[in-house]
Image: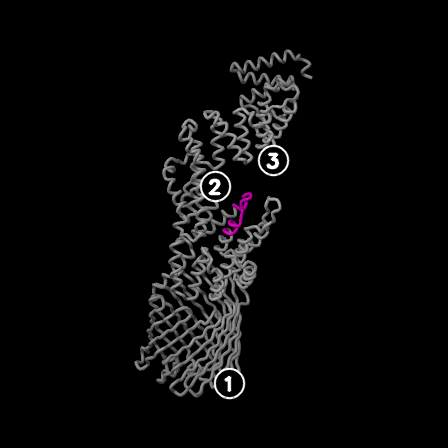
Amino acid sequence: MAENYFDQEKIDRLREQAVLDVRNGQANEGLIALKKLLEISPNSQKVIADYIVVAKQQNKFSSDDFDLAKRINFQTYPQYAQLATIKSFRDLKQFDTALMLVDGFIHVQPDTQLDVLKAVLLAENMQKKLAIQQLAKIKMDQLTIDQQVQVAYAYRVVDMQIEGLETIQKAFALQPDSVAVQHEYLLALMANGSYNQVLSLVQERKSIDPDGKFYNEAYLGDFSQKINEAIKNQKYLSQQGETDNESFTMLDSILASTHEYQKSLTPESAYYLKFYYNYIYALSYRDRHSEAIQLAESLNTPIEKMPAFVRNAIADSYLALKQPQKAETIYKSLLKEKNYADMKLYTALYYSLIEQEKYKEANQLVNDIDKLLPTYQYSEAKGAERRVHPDRAEYIGLKETANSYSNRMNLAEKNLTDIVAKAPNNDEYINLLARTQRWREKPLQAERTLSRLNGIKPESKATLINRMQNAQALGDIAAWRYNTQNLNLFYPTDTSITKSLNELNDRNHATISHQTRISKSESDQQRVLENLKGTRDFETTTRINSPWIKDHYRAIAEYGNREGNYRAGDIREQRLSVGAQWEKRGKSATVLLSQDLDRSDRTGVRIDWDHRLNDHWQYNLDFNSMAAIPLQALKLGEKGKSYGMGINWKQNESRQAGFGYQITDITDGNLRQEISANYSQNVYSSAHHTTRAGVSTYFGHNSLDQTSYFSPKRSLSAEVNLSHDWLTWRRYEKSFIQKFSMSAGAFHQTDYGTKPVLDLQYRHKWQINRLWGLQYGVGWSIHPYDGEREKQFYGTLGFEGRF
């Protein structure tokens, strides 16, 4: 070995000279000399010790030196170098090696400082249980001030904050001017959330915090803590029925109190981003979403590099500002964060998807959540039973909401009915069930469901909003107005309330609707067209409604025009009607006075009555003293009166049936009676597609069949109907729907036998914005008249809006 060439005495002299060089300021030369001695005498304990001590002093101990730990002989290693050696490995995060050294030295010579250092190393090495056991062995009354600081630090690392604070408080009482004690005391206070004490202490003793580090850390910690407390307070007050203005008072005050601190911050400050991250989080929760986004963009920091809670807040603001694409991207990035995803995040991601019409992906997410969420929550308390995880309740609500949004409302209602039967006092499930029933066009049943919550105080926000929306669906305008205006005071930023308020205010504006149908007919027998039906038809109706007066009344002006081309020439009827409508909670009465603009003797009155008996049954009655008789009869100066009634049954939004009867008494002696019936139901429903199928029948009887217009003695038709709606595009209140419909069947006319009938139609429906809609379409039909087939091509155009 190399040691054979150098005797130990010479090595010691060279080692001592190297150490002396270091003391005389020649640290680099001394370290080089010690390193050469290690090559000559690699197992010399004193050389190893001095090399490590000097290397640590010069901050030159590196990973190249890790192998030295294997050469240490615990029996002969110099005691003066033990702590420096352990700390050298500790500084480079080699905790396992440092612990091995500590145990070796303690085994040879037990020492309190080594016991303390072992506790610190175990804590830093995330061996929490062993660290706590080691701390328990230490006799606190035998520690020096420095050792008390180390023990307090170890307690803080293993999250035993109270014990850590108690330990350092004793040291602070003995040596309040010690910098190490002061710093650990401040850190312990902050770890216990005592930020105000830190702020007071650093203001009293300026010397403790010369660079303002502790002040800023404490201020930001206090700011974050207050925000969280304010949010908890807001949630509690909201549950107790307080208004938003009241429940957000604490948070508003906290945000306002930061103006002076913001003035002290510059973009170069180490605390600039940390402060504004918390500020963005608070702004987003306060529904000040535009401010939150503007502030986030002004930080000039990529969103993906911001902390998870800030990104979440920014995504929430993007979603609230109707920018779901940006929200989705951020939410998905948060799913990759370890142990971050929870039901709140999953729910937000779901809504960001459906607001982009990504229903397939959204529904898959709902299925995935079921697998990702824990089923049970376990307690560490001995003997405590497992409980259903609280996120499960929220998941059930999201799952049934997803069913409703995907037009599987029958499934959603069934599931929620079963759930409410098992949890009859659960506010959330009762509200979800009532909402689903209302969406299924059963507001009375929804009202009965909500009545289960009567007497429960305070009423939740969801219950109050449900009552408001149900009053609207029931046509109870007074209750709707009262609830909406009251809730707007409580929750002015809630989108459901804003929507309801807008729709309530819409009643203060006039509305208009228009429908036009123009057609051209062809037939092998020209007389059918020239005498009975006409070669061209044109019908248009425009109606203007005044704003509602005293909730239940409005004036109506209506213009109607019918035109047809016959052998005798063009025949036209223009009729102007004015009148009023009364409507209240499912009942409606309309009275219109009408005048033919081309024939002064044709003045009439029209009366309509409509009554919704319950969620399923509705009937209507109508009378018209100047009925819309065939244009050929009109040309001959005939008049007519009509009486009608109808009964409609609706199980829900998916299934309905109707029956109608009308009698028209024409002055030429013809008494026309018509009976119709229909049934239809959804056969396929999804988020963007709805297919309905049904049947319809018609029976007609005329007392005269030898007339100038089509007037069969008896006629009967039966048809099968099929329609499909495709929601092709939607962006919040704007949408585009393609509508396809087909009717096919047979028409029987006395003396002319039975012939096929067919009607095909294709339409577009645009919702331009919340107030205006447009629809248009084309169609083609086949229908027999006196045994001769008519082919008709037609187009339709309509719009409706609010001024």
Marks 1,2: beta carbons within 8 A: no
Q: Residue at x 55, y 13 (%)?
A: 20
x and y percentages locating residue 627 in the rendered image: 38, 80
**Residue 193 visible (yes or no):** yes
Q: Is residue 736 above or below residue 10?
A: below
Give the mark, 2 or 3, whose residue is nearer the N terminus.
3
Q: CA distance from mark 2 to mark 3?
A: 33 Å
User: What's the image's color scheme?
Assistant: one colour
Q: Amino acid at mark 2?
A: Met
| Image point (54%, 28%), residue name | 150
Q: Nearer the viewer, residue 177 or 500?
A: 177
- Identify the residue shown where x is 50% and y is 81%: 716
Q: Is residue 289 visible?
A: no
Q: Which is more foreground, mark 2 or mark 3?
A: 3
How many C-alpha atoms fall within 10 Å of the one at disc 1: few (<14), some, or many (≥20)? some
Characterize the local packing of mark 2: few (<14), some (14-19) or many (20 or more) Cα atoms within 10 angstroms: some
- Identified by mark 1, the residue type is Tyr
Name the secondary structure under disc 2. loop
> Which of the 4 quarters of the picture holds residue 420?
bottom right
Q: Which residues are magenta?
A: 334-348
Q: Of the numbered discs in the image, which one, if any, rests on residue 306?
A: 2
* Circle 3: residue type: Lys
Residue 103 part of the magenta-drawn span: no
User: Which numbered disc, 1 or 3, marks the residue closer to the eye?
Assistant: 3
Q: Which residue is mark 3?
A: 129
Quarter assignment of residue 276? top left
Residue 724 vs 749, above or below: the answer is above
